[in-house]
Every structure is written in C-alpha cells, then in structure tokens.
C-alpha cells in the first residue's frame, strides 16, 4: 500500500507541470488591431462586414473564447496612431494587425511584436522588410504596391479621356513614408502620358471642397485619388464634388461605385481575410520574419457609364472593353 501511495504521489507531482502547461496553452491569444479610421467608417466601407474577424472565424478563432481582440481606432486622426500603437504594445498583445499608415505607427512602437499589414505600402520599398520572400524583421502581411496602382489609375484616366492634359493627385496631407514613392511613380507615368500631374494634399473633410474648387480653377480636368481610409470614407463626397465641378475621377473600385468615373484596385475584403490567415500562422508558432509577404494578384477595373453621361463624356470603346464591370 505504501509503495502504491508513493507511486501515486510521484505521478501526481509529474502531472502538475503538464497541467500548468496545458493551462498556458489554453490562454487566449491576444490580437491588437490598429485602424487609422473609425469602426463606423470601416463598416460602411465593407458594407456592414468585418472581413478580418470573419477570416479569423473561418479559421476556427472565436472572439471571447479562443481569441481576444484589442481594437484601437484613430477616427481619422493620424497623429493619434502612435499613441494607440503604444497602448497595444503595453497590452502585450501577441500580434498587431493594421493597414495603411497604421504600419508606420506600429513599427515605431515595437520591433519585437509581430506586425501584420492587412493592406498597404510596399514593405521592402519603405525599408520595413529585407525582401518579399524573407522579410526578416517583425513585419509581414499583404501588399498591393500602391505607387504602381496610382500610376495605373492615371493611365486609365487618360484612356477614358484622351484630351486630358492636367490632373490632380489627391494625397494625404501628413506625408508618410510611402508618399515619395507614389509621387515618383505618378510623375513617371505623367511624363509618358504627357499629362501635367499636380499633387493635392488634403487631411480633413472640410478641406475637400476647397481643394476640388481650387483644382478646377487651375484647369485641372481630373483627380487621381489615393487608397487611404480618409479618402475611402469620403468617396461619395469626392465623387459628387468632382462631378459638380466637371472633373473626372479615378480611384478605388468603391469610388467608382459611389459615383466616380473609373475605379481600379484590389478587393480589400479579400486582403483582410488573407491577413487573418497570416495571423493564424503566427499564433501557431511561425516566425514573422520567415512568413513571405503576399502580393495582391487580382485587380478590378470598374467604369461608371452613368457618370460619364452626366459629364458629357463619350468613353472610348477601348476603356469599356477593359472594364470588369460597367455601371449603367
């Protein structure tokens, strides 16, 4: 009896570390979510969906049961992003998910916690990764090379309106690390197309109308609009103001659906779902620096024929043939 009791005691002692490790393994993962926009704006942009959370759920993560999400929204105030990123670092989250200019705030806040970019700039070009295949640092995620996309929009605008000679390029007023790349790419495209491309920096909603009026007064015929939460949130206002002043527009596919002339870009919902799969790899033990940065491979072109008619613009057959979708 004594021998059996002794062996039982030894077995119980051996089981304790296993039980402790099991409890640690069951600790809910903590994801930090850093948004330059507001939650309301994101819901509007994604038509009531939350593609990142939906992506996590599809992978088996249930918020409140198997994963916690610490969300911080800058509400359009770029200057608050760094403070919000610092809050997530203080919360000791396992990974930070962000997009657009949130990337720079997150990286300024930590070089240890993994950062997953849901969509945004070229990681390598802004020197936050060594290469797409082997990032090496603490940043990975999804990119769609915004500088090349903006140049392509100018090209599509010229194809839609061959008489285009002067275009305005809507950029964020508080320049970020990718702005120089965008300016250079658009400038090169403008020279090839023989178009005078003028940067227009805007940072607040109240500045939109004044900027569009000023552009029209200077003889600008069209606007190329940046992919950024600020411009995405005000897509309908930009499209309406541009039409009011007889300016054509080229921006995101959402801009075209809101009344802009040409939309060219990526499906952001797909990219945010892909970001969830990257987070899954990290939470399962993969090193962030070894996870290749994914490139968007699918781009859509949308032409708003109703807007063209309202502007008195007869679109060339070529631009209509290139469109994946034509809005009547």
Image (cartoon, helix red, strand yellow):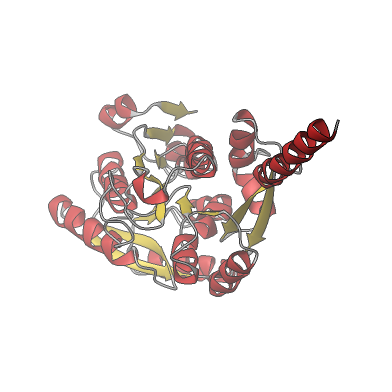
Q: Position of residue 185 (x, y in %)?
A: 23, 56
- The residue most toward the left is 192
Residue 65: image x %, image y %? 75, 40
Residue found at x 26% / y 58%: 125
Question: In the rendered view, does 198 fall on the left or right side of 258?
Answer: left
Give left or right: position of 277 versus 192: right
What residue occupies the far right of the structure in this picture?
Answer: 1
Tell me: 91 left or right of 201.
Answer: right
Residue 308, by quadrant, is top left
101 shown above or below 232:
below
Q: Is residue 56 left or right of residue 15?
A: left
- State whether residue 244 is above or below residue 208: above
Q: Nearer the viewer, residue 297 or 56?
A: 56
When the figure is inspected, residue 100 is found, relative to residue 53, above or below; the finding is below
Residue at image position (52%, 43%) is: 279
Q: Position of residue 34 (x, y in %)?
A: 58, 58
The front one of 12 and 76 is 12
Q: Is residue 175 visible?
A: yes
């Amino acid at each position: 009896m004594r021998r059996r009791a002794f062996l039982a005691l030894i077995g119980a002692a051996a089981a304790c570390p296993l039980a402790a490790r099991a409890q640690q393994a069951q600790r809910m993962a903590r994801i930090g979510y850093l948004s330059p926009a507001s939650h309301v704006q994101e819901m509007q942009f994604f038509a009531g969906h939350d593609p990142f959370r939906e992506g996590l759920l599809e992978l088996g993560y249930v918020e409140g049961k198997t994963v916690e999400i610490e969300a911080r929204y800058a509400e359009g105030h770029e200057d608050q992003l760094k403070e919000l990123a610092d809050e997530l670092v203080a919360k000791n989250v396992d990974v930070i998910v962000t997009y657009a200019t949130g990337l720079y705030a997150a990286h300024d806040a930590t070089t240890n916690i993994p950062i997953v970019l849901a969509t945004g700039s070229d990681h390598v070009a802004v020197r936050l990764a060594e290469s797409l295949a082997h990032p090496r640092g603490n940043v990975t995620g999804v990119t769609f090379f915004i500088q090349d996309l903006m140049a392509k929009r100018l090209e599509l605008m010229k194809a839609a309106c061959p008489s285009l000679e002067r275009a305005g390029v809507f950029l964020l007023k508080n320049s970020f690390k990718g702005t120089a790349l965008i300016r250079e790419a658009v400038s090169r495209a403008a020279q090839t197309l023989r178009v005078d491309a003028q940067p227009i920096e805007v940072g607040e909603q109240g500045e939109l109308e004044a900027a569009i009026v000023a552009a029209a007064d200077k003889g600008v015929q069209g606007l190329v609009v940046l992919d950024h939460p600020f411009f995405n949130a005000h897509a309908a206002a930009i499209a309406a103001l541009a039409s009011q002043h007889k300016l054509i527009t080229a921006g995101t596919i959402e801009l075209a659906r809101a009344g802009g002339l040409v939309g060219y870009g990526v499906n952001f919902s797909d990219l945010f779902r892909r970001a969830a799969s990257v987070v899954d790899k990290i939470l399962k033990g993969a090193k962030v620096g070894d996870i290749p940065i994914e490139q968007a491979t699918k781009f859509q072109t949308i032409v708003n024929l109703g807007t063209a008619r309202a502007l008195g613009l007869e679109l060339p057959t070529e631009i209509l043939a290139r469109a994946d979708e034509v809005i009547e």
